[in-house]
Image (spheres, helix red, strand yellow):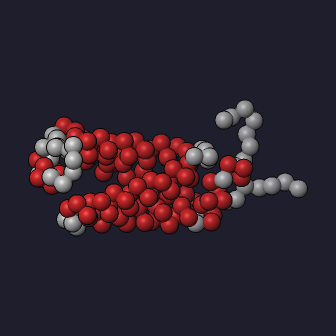
Amino acid sequence: MTRTSPRLPLSIIALLLLLVVGLAPGGLYGAVAFITDPSGASLGVSTALLARLPFVKDFLLPGFFLLGVMTIAPVVIVVGLWRRRAWGWPAALALSAVLIAWLLFEIWMFGLTAPIQFVTGALGFVLLGLCLLPSVRAFSRVDAAPKTAGLA
């Protein structure tokens, strides 16, 4: 008896990849703005917002966070999902949790002050929901991936 890999509708694959890749441009925009201008003035934010955070006097560290977590990580996760790597699905799930935690942290620190917070929250919850769909989980299982000789 031959085992076939579960087929996931292209729309779910596209949506999952779009959500993960959709984070990268926004993350890159914020990262570049904060890294090149740690005062936050280029984005219209004040370092006074950071008063409650120890060891953070400007937006340089948040800029590097945005670069790593919201820009580079989503691109790497797309590769893992596309190639059906064992770490792809857990990484996408973790990224959705990080997005939700980041949003909750922003709300706690600054309140709901910008429309991008709603976008970030929506992306986090939609990504979480997609990752938890049984069809996405089955598709992402390594033992369900088609075997190809000589390709890793």
Q: Measured along the vertical axis of the image, is residue 108 above or below residue 80?
A: below
Q: Residue furthest top?
A: 150
Q: Is residue 61 visible?
A: yes
Q: Residue at x 56, y 64 (%)?
A: 132
User: 89 left or right of 68?
Assistant: right
> Where residue 21 sits in the image (x, y, percent)?
42, 50
Q: Residue at x 15, y 40 (%)?
A: 37
> Where residue 104 sits in the image (x, y, percent)?
32, 63
Nearer the observer, 149 or 54:
54
Q: Quadrant of residue 112?
A: bottom left
Assign the C terminus to one quadrant of the image.
top right
Q: Measured along the vertical axis of the image, is residue 152 above or below residue 44?
A: above
> Where residue 146 sits in the image (x, y, percent)?
72, 47
Q: How many marks?
A: 0
Q: Residue at x 16, y 43 (%)?
A: 57
Q: Residue at x 51, y 50 (%)?
A: 91
User: 91 left or right of 71?
Assistant: right
Q: Is residue 34 visible?
A: no
